[in-house]
Each structure stands twice: as structure tokens, then as C-alpha cells.
Amino acid sequence: MTNPILKIENVSFVYGKNTPFQKDALHDVSFHVKKGEFLGLIGHTGSGKSTLNQLLNGLLYPEQGRITFDNGEDKIILLPKVETKRRRKKKLNADEIKLRDLRFKVGLVFQYPEHQLFEETVYKDIAFGPRNMGVAEDEIDGRVKEALALVGLDEALLEESPFALSGGQQRRAAIAGVLAMRPEVLILDEPTAGLDPAGRDEILQNIRDHHKQTGATVILVTHSMEDIARHVERIVVLRRGEILTQGTPRDVFRQSDLLRSNGLAPPQVTQIMAKLALLVPGMDTGIHTVEQAAAYLERAKTDA
């Protein structure tokens, strides 16, 4: 069994604690992310997805519980802020205070990442992260071109202003800026939001290629059940700051009624198969891609 690269253990988080605006964002959340896994994270608006993303990247501290990054060589533990301060004061367990390292090892691509572009050229924007990490200048050039290729952009664009690119190109350039840091875990928060179907498919294929070529762990956060169904190996579903269910896409999408009651619609092909099952009992209601449905129905036709 592959060892988990991320362990989320009994994590809770509260915004505005002890104020009139207090809001519990996460409550006692626990799950593991395996090294090299392609994980999907879904949930209705307000379910805690964005808060969890920022915790995994070390931008927020948990109110309770712990988050552990462990790649087999480096181990970083994120504890509640009060506990971290106490341990710093007493010089206990240096693993728990390597937040800067955590942010480089767990790369976070925010929703609409093109809004974060700021440099004069595409090259400088992509190079900013590695340079901030202290990567040698002679290595930065290779990283920039490698990241550019991973997102499917031409090197001819490197000296262009990022603001002269199309919307889809800006999105890919921003993602390349995170990939250039070579994070071992890549979190993408709604990476296809606002893109047309062609642009969405290109971005997702770039992410899939990156996963295959580098073996990096990828966490995809999206409202699109079709995107989740086509690309991920396992799904974690959040509801009101707690885990509603988790498992393979087949296992999760079989729970159509549970998903719908929490504002999530299964992929359209799964809904069609569920309706067919009412007419033909015994049909597989866990099918979640068009390709699976076509193969299944062809086999059923042959068997008949």
C-alpha cells in the first residue's frame, strides 16, 4: 500500500472565533492523501473546500488537529497556532515549524490564478517562484521551459507580457508559475472556472499529463462532476465542514440520492444509467463516464 503524503487528522477551523461573526468552517475532518494519487475534492458552496486547501498549503493553521506532510524523506507537521508557538518557544520538534518548506512542497493554484500575474514578461512570472525558493539561476531557465511545456504554451510567448495573452493562456501561464516550483502535491481550486469547453479540456489534459509525467500528487477541487468523474482516482465529499462520504468515483456516484440531497448532481451519464436501472433492474448505477457506459451497454447487448 502506498504511504500517505498528507494526513489530515481531526482538523477543525473557525473563522472569527469569539466574535459575533464566528463561523465553523471545518469540524473534525480526517482523511489521507496517498503519494502519487489523483484526488477529487467536491462539495457545495460553503462546504469548507477552500479553507481546507489553505490549511494544506500552510496559509492557515488548524484550530484543532494536525496536518502532516511526509514524503518519506521530509516530515512537516502543522499544528494549531497556539501549540506551534509553545513548541517554538521551547525549541521542540523543528518539523512542526517548517511552514515555508510546506508552501513550496504543497503548491496551491487559486481560483482564477491569472489574477495573480504581475511581472513584465511571462518568463519573469514563471521564474518568480523558483527564484524565491533560492533555486540557482542556471536551473531556473530549465524549470521555466519545463513548466511552460507542461501547460502546453509555446516558448515564443516567454518574452510577451502576461497581460497580452488570451484568458486561457493566462490561466496556463499562472499554473506554470506553480509547476516551476516542482511541488510534490499540487492543489487546483476550480482550475477551469470561466473557460469555454475547449479551454477547460486543454487545462485538464495538461494537469493529467503533469500527473503522469512527474508522479506528483494532485488534488482537484471542482464543481464539475463530469471533470471529477473523468480524471480522479478517489473522491472526498465535504458537507458543512465535515466529510459526507469518500471513495472511488464508482462508489461515490452510486450514492446519487445522498449527493442530490446535499446540492450535488452526479454526472449526467450516471443519472441516465440510474433511470435505465428503473426499467432494467440490475444495471450498474456506478458508471460515471460516457466511455464506461458505451462499453457496458455494448456488453449487455452482446450478452442478450
Image: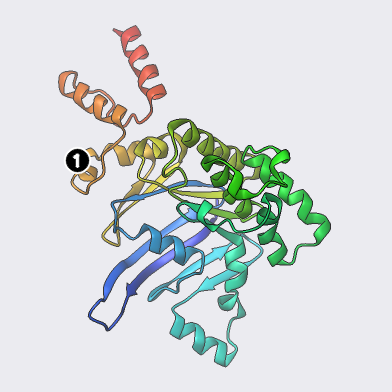
Q: Residue at x 83, y 56 (%)?
A: 138
Check disc 1 and report the residue beneath it: 257
In this image, 197 relative to 19: left or right?
right
In this image, 144 relative to 89: left or right?
A: right
**Quadrant housing residue 105:** bottom right
State whether residue 268 appears in this view: yes
Q: Secondary structure at mark 1?
A: helix
Asked if residue 143 is positioned above or below residue 66 in the image, the reply reads above
**Which residue corresponds to the image point at 72% horizontal and 47% vertical from the top-left?**
159
- Write the residue at 27% across / 84% down: 18
Q: Nearer the viewer, residue 99 or 247?
A: 99
- Residue 63 lies, in percent from the top left, at 38, 76
Residue 237: image location, x then y, percent: 33, 51
Q: How is the image coloured?
A: rainbow
Q: Farthest left residue? A: 278
**In the image, what residue type sits under mark 1?**
Asp
Give left or right: position of 118 versus 115.
right
Q: Position of residue 155 (x, y in %)?
A: 72, 40
Q: Position of residue 287 (x, y in %)?
A: 33, 29
